[in-house]
Amino acid sequence: MRRTIVYAVAATLAIGGGLAALRPAGAQPSSTTEKKTTTQVTKTTTAAVPAGGDLRAMVDRQVEAAQKKLVALAEATPAEKYGWRPGEGVRSTGEVFMHVASANYFLPTFWGAQVPAGVDPRTLEKDGGDKAKTVAALKASFDSLRQAIAAAPASDLGKPVKIFGHDATVGEVMLGVASHCHEHLGQAIAYARVNGIVPPWSAAEGARGGR
């Protein structure tokens, strides 16, 4: 068991994120320093992004792929496992899912998107132990993120922006958001495997005779 946990942590640390180069330690919303508030999840409708070579469409496809797997894994994880963490000071299973939700709301603000009324990205992780709230927040955050991607004008993709004190463009931030989703998908998969949870898509492939 100890070897499995070490492997899972190593796998998590090995996963690179596009935002890692832009984000100094502690720059994202903290789950421990903000006053606790009640989070209201705003129901939104996923907006379609034009197909083709548009960078926004490419990013949206990557985000959608991560969305399907993260939501499926969050739903497949038993409620009692949401508080599990591989070690002291490390995010729990539920906090990882909520961290993704937080970033989905927060990062688009760098290209001018607005966080939905009633949502505070800085406090979401505090509800990471509640499966129902976490799954709902994760779903709503992806709807909001994909709307923000669709709403950004194509002419703004090369627009310079500052993110965590570094120079970037709107397009780079969008790519970073997609990378962030996949980074923590990998982390969530490692957590699940340690706890004997088979990701739903892997279980489906196994049932069809795949690996």
Image (cartoon, rainbow, N blue to C red):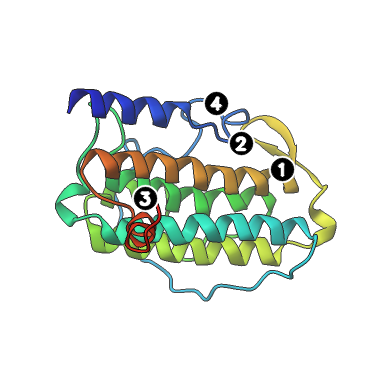
- Frontmost of labels 4 and 2 is 2
Is the residue 207 above or below the residue 181 in the image?
below
- Dot 4 falls on a residue whose secondary structure is loop
On the picture, is 140 further left or further right than 153? left
* Residue carrying label 4: 24
Tell which of 179 and 199 is nearer to you: 199
* Residue carrying label 2: 18
Residue 210: give x, y in percent of width and height: 40, 55
Looking at the image, tell me whether mark 3 or mark 2 is earlier in sequence order: 2
- The three-letter code of the residue at mark 3 reads Met
- Frontmost of labels 3 and 2 is 2
- Dot 2 falls on a residue whose secondary structure is loop
- The three-letter code of the residue at mark 1 reads Glu
- The three-letter code of the residue at mark 4 reads Pro
Task: State whether residue 47 appears in this view.
Answer: yes
Q: How far apart are labels 3 and 2 at the CA level?
A: 19 Å
